[in-house]
Amino acid sequence: MKFLVLTVLSAGFLTTAASAQDLGAPMIEGGQVEDIAIEGDEDAGPLRGTVTDESSLDDLGIAIPAFATDRNRETAANADGTAALGREVARVITANLRNNGLFEPTGPDSLPTPEFQQITAPAWGSWGGRGAEMLVHGYVRARDDGRLVVGCYLYDVALQDELVREGWVVPPADWRRAAHKCSDLVYSRLTGEDPFFDSRIAYIAETGPKDARVKRLAVMDSDGANHRFLTLGSATALTPRYSPDYSKILYLSYVDGNPRIYVYDIGSGQQTLVSENANPTLAPRWSPDGRYVLYSMAVAGNTDIYRVPVTGGRSVRLTDTPGIDIAGSYSPDGGRIVFESDRSGTQQCYVMDADGTNQRRISFFGGRCATPEWSPRGDQIAFTRIAGDFNVAVMTPSGRNMRVLTGGWQDEAPTWAPNGRIIQFFRTTRNSGDSSLWQVDLTGQNERRLPTPVDASDPAWGPIRP
Amino acid sequence: MTISRTRLATTTILASALALGACSKEAPAELPPTPQAATPAPTATQQPTGPTVGTQAHFEDAVGSSTVVYFDTDRYNIDSTDAAALQEQAQYIAAYPQLTFTIEGHTDERGTREYNLALGERRANSAKNYLVSLGVSPDRIRTVSYGKERPVALASNPEAWAQNRRAASIVVN
């Protein structure tokens, strides 16, 4: 394998924004979420042990009554004050756990509302009688500076003891993040898995008929809330990817008439080309540290994979076969890249070292292998398996233990949850071309459609938010 | 500036013959028939009401359905039918040296989005390279791929897919 240094018109500093940008107003971020000590922290601390229930987790009953408040105060997060906000927080947690097929949650609308003092001293008798094995308590307190303190406690009802607790300070606009963090705390404590709820999804919103489809860049929370369109729709946008720190989005736009990869800065609303040259650039992916962009470029019809610093500069060519080499995706340690190539005659998946050496095919089952995405845990590669229909499948990085997880007519472009346990993808309907976002867990059992305001494709799930 | 109609008509007849001979071609049934030799009517371009030079309509009047070439699934080679169509295009391009063209590469919906963008680019370049081999200056032809994003036939069946696997030449105004 040769290493070709690309001598295209190198971007240098990439400070020049494209002239016409098709961009909406920049997004205002709420700010950081801080951890904070909460009521109960002076006690002995939560129980460190296994939960009492031995049955499967999706049968585990969890009561999630309204979060209490020390006193009902005005807050920018809810017109009816902190008490009403506490109920909303519990609803968000309940929906998170239920929609993902985890546990058997009961929400605040069918449960009594605890007093503030009961958050750290649950009324065990009343919860034990409701068939709930687990109890989530919490509170919302408005501080004088307007920010919110949210405490989250998980109790084992049978043991009558606390399993875990955490607290956060959030700006009012970010109150849902506290609910997601509480969901993550409960999920992680009960499953032993890493969290995933406090994350966002970039995707392509689609409207209009099949032959005149408008495709806009859009973003939303992992549960579909805080939805926002980032482009206006005059130019087709495709294949977004959130940067690891959520400050930027890579995506393809036809804004200058050609398919090109842009780096969109969420805070400033500015965007720059990853590579200033006349050739089409495709299939952008971030390196795990967010410093590099992996992309493909077609030169005289031949497509290869390149790497370029996100700040601009020289592109390094990583593949040089006469086929289409595309859709490179880094391993979580940044050491390897999985990609697809039709060098064998059909789309198949290959792995190479990050410098382009040791290219070897890993997919040898029937059918084709496209859009491979390395799991954040490193142990699996999700991909689009083409064997008649398109389905989402997973395999190990050596190409073993291939498992098909979905059964739609055209399920395409998997993206991983931050914890590597759930995969999102988009499903296209035969003839109509309608498209929607779906997710499935690694068992293939829990599949559901994600709510989006309009049709949707190309989901890209970001990491846990900083 | 007028095109040599005799020459174009002759080429069209040849193209039709080639098209009939190329029975392995996937030419979809829904396509309009290959233009008859008489299609670029001798008086057409002299009518003040007809399409003017520099419009797509004028190009289509001259070469008919040959503004578009079609490909087999996952393929991008120029077969004899494509070659005949591109020869017609080359005649027209030669006749109007002031014009520039964009070749749009497209795919059917039965491929993944990113791969199809690359495949469309490969098809557009195949068509361009063939025109260049016929003497067209590469500076006059730009390529762009739309992958599967802009179908012309909307059903999800083999006939529609055949119509969507195409490279379409467009006159740039």
Image (cartoon, coloured by chain):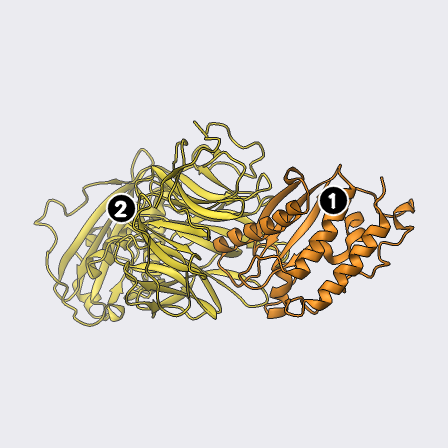
Can you say whether A357 is above or below A427 in the image? above
Q: What residue did someone put label 1 on?
A: B93
Q: Which residue in the structure is indicated by mark 2?
A: A335
Using the image, determine if residue A124 lies above or below residue A458: below
Q: Does residue A12 appear left or right of residue B38 in this picture?
A: left
Residue A182 pos. (x, y %) = 27, 52
Find residue A140 and name its label: none
User: Badge 1: how crowded within 10 Å, few (<14), some, or many (20+)?
Assistant: many
Tell me, yes or no, if residue A74 can be seen here: no
Three-letter amino acid code at the position of disc 1: Ile
Q: Check the rendered structure and report the hue given to chain B.
A: orange
State the image quarter where residue A175 is shown. Answer: top left
Q: Is residue A394 visible?
A: yes
**Quadrant including the N terminus of chain B:** top right
**SS at circle 2:** loop
Quadrant for residue A249, please give it.
top left
Give me the chain that's yellow.
A
Q: Please, is residue A392 above or below residue B61 in the view?
A: below
Check the residue under mark 2 and report the chain it is in. Answer: A
How would you rate the neighbour count of disc 2 (Cα within 10 Å): few for under 14, some for 14-19, many for 20 or more?
few
The disc numbered 1 marks a residue on which chain?
B
Q: Say whether residue A114 is left or right of residue A11.
A: left
Place of residue A235 in the rendered image (x, y in percent of width and height, measured from the top left): 58, 44
Q: Nearer the viewer, mark 2 or mark 1?
A: 1
Q: Is residue A32 left or right of residue A253?
A: left
Count how many numbered circles sit on residues in the image.
2
Q: Are marks 2 and 1 in contact (CB under 8 Å)?
A: no
Q: Position of residue A46 (x, y in %)?
A: 12, 53
Query: Quadrant location of the C terminus of chain B?
Result: top right
